[in-house]
Image (cartoon, helix red, strand yellow):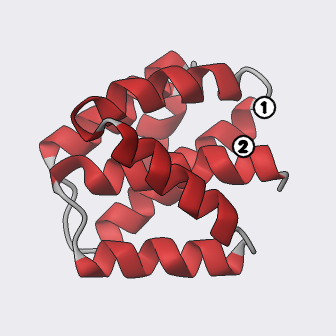
Amino acid sequence: MTSEEKKAFLLLKSVIFHYHGLDEDEQQMLNETASQLNALEELEWANQFINEDYFNAFERARAYLNSSMEHIDKKKRLEFLSKVWYANNRKGYISEMEATAMLKLAKDWDIESDLIEYIKK
């Protein structure tokens, strides 16, 4: 995974986790992901991006990610969203707002039906 892909993935995961306020478990999952990807700098970048304007973070991230995803193939886009969906599920729940946010992104990235199929499984 390139540094730009790591940034996009960690921003995606982080902005979804921040949707209701980041808790300790979510922060730990983000740290684990960054460690596994050797992407601590990219995680720090994502945190700064979100903290720059917390209340508009999702819409700003959505614009950034839409631009980034133009250069990433559909299979990897689905992989990114699937991993974030799974991580949210791992914490015990996915709120309606988090699900809606991920579905909006899937629609933006032209993988909505693919994500829905993944979710059904």
Residue drawn at x 62%, y 43% as measured from the top left: 8
Image quadrant assignment for residue 53: top left
Are the residues tagged 1 and 2 within 8 Å (C-beta)? Answer: yes
Is disc 1 surrounded by few (<14), some (14 to 19) or many (20+) residues within 10 Å?
few
Image coords of residue 91 (percent x, y): 27, 74
**Image position, residue 71 (x, y; %):** 80, 26
Q: Which amino acid does label 2 sit on?
A: Lys
Instruction: Answer with the quarter of the image where residue 73 lies.
Output: top right
Give residue 114's mark: none
Q: Looking at the image, which residue is at 56% across and 26% down? A: 64
Looking at the image, residue 110 sits to the left or right of residue 94; the answer is right
Name the quadrant of the C terminus: bottom left
Q: Residues within 10 Å of mark 2 (few under 14, many from 20)?
A: few
Query: What is the quadrant of residue 103 in the picture?
Result: top left
Looking at the picture, does residue 8 appear above or below residue 67? below
Q: Nearer the viewer, residue 75 or 47?
A: 47
Residue in the picture at 23% in, 47% down = 19
Camera-side residue: 118 or 75? 75
| Residue type (three-letter) at the residue carrying disc 1 | Asp
Residue 102 relative to residue 118: left or right: left
Label 1 and label 2: CA atoms lie apart by: 6 Å
Q: Name the residue under label 2.
A: 76
Q: Is mark 1 on a helix, strand or loop?
A: loop
Q: Label 1: which residue?
A: 73
70 vs 16: above or below: above
For residue 27, say whether it is visible.
yes
Instruction: Name the spot of residue 45 as percent of width and height, x first.
Output: 58, 53
SS at badge 2:
helix
Q: Is residue 104 left or right of residue 11?
A: left
Query: What residue is at 85 percent from the left and 51 percent from the top?
Result: 2
Position of residue 115 measured from the top left corner of the image (x, y, whole percent) = 48, 38
What is the total number of numbered labels drawn onto the structure image? 2
